Image (cartoon, helix red, strand yellow):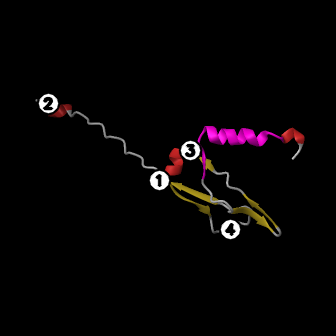
């Protein structure tokens, strides 16, 4: 790490703490691998509300000719159907 870059991590940690972000991936999951090298990252961050409704966060098992792995994230998000507006039928008025 160069001297110019020192202290940058403190800004990131403060940001994560201030917003109460949670990491979705388990520690140690490889997102990239090539021969003798690999990258392990666990910085898929979400708010507490999203962390509470997560159904799945995992590496996609099918490879698409890329060194990087696809990460699947599924949330349990319910959407209410819009209420149907009642229409008056003026032809039935006596």
* Among numbered discs 2 and 4, the one appearing first in the sequence: 4
Q: What's the CA distance linking mark 3 and mark 1?
A: 14 Å
| Residue under label 2 | 93
Report, in whole angstroms, how far the alpha carbon at label 1 lies from the one at label 4. Answer: 26 Å
Separation of residues labelled 3 and 4 (CA atoms): 29 Å
Give coordinates of residue 15: x percent, y percent.
Answer: 67, 39
Residues in magenta, as a range: 6-23
Q: Is residue 2 above or below residue 61?
A: above
Residue 55 lies, in percent from the top left, at 50, 58
Q: Spatial distance from mark 2 to mark 4, Cα to Cα?
A: 65 Å
Along the polypeptide, which appears first: circle 1 or circle 4?
Answer: 4
Question: Which image quadrant for residue 6?
Answer: top right
- Callout 3: helix, strand or loop? loop
Q: Secondary structure at mark 1?
A: loop
- Which circle, 3 or 2, is nearer the viewer? 3
Q: Quadrant of residue 37?
A: bottom right
Up-down relation of residue 14 to residue 42 (above or below): above
Q: Which mark is residue 47?
A: 3
Q: What residue sits right under mark 4 in the picture?
A: 63
Magenta stretch: dominant SS? helix
Please say if 68 is above or below 5: below
- Residue under numbered circle 1: 76
Disc 2, SS: loop
Q: Is residue 22 magenta?
A: yes
């Amino acid at each position: 790490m160069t001297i110019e870059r020192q202290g940058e991590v403190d800004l990131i940690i403060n940001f994560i703490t201030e917003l109460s972000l949670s990491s979705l991936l388990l520690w140690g999951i490889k997102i990239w691998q090539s021969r003798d090298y690999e990258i392990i990252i666990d910085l898929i961050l979400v708010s507490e509300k999203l962390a509470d409704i997560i159904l799945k966060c995992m590496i996609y098992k099918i490879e698409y000719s890329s060194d990087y792995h696809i990460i699947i994230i599924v949330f349990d998000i319910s959407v209410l159907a819009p209420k149907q507006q009642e229409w008056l039928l003026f032809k039935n008025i006596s």
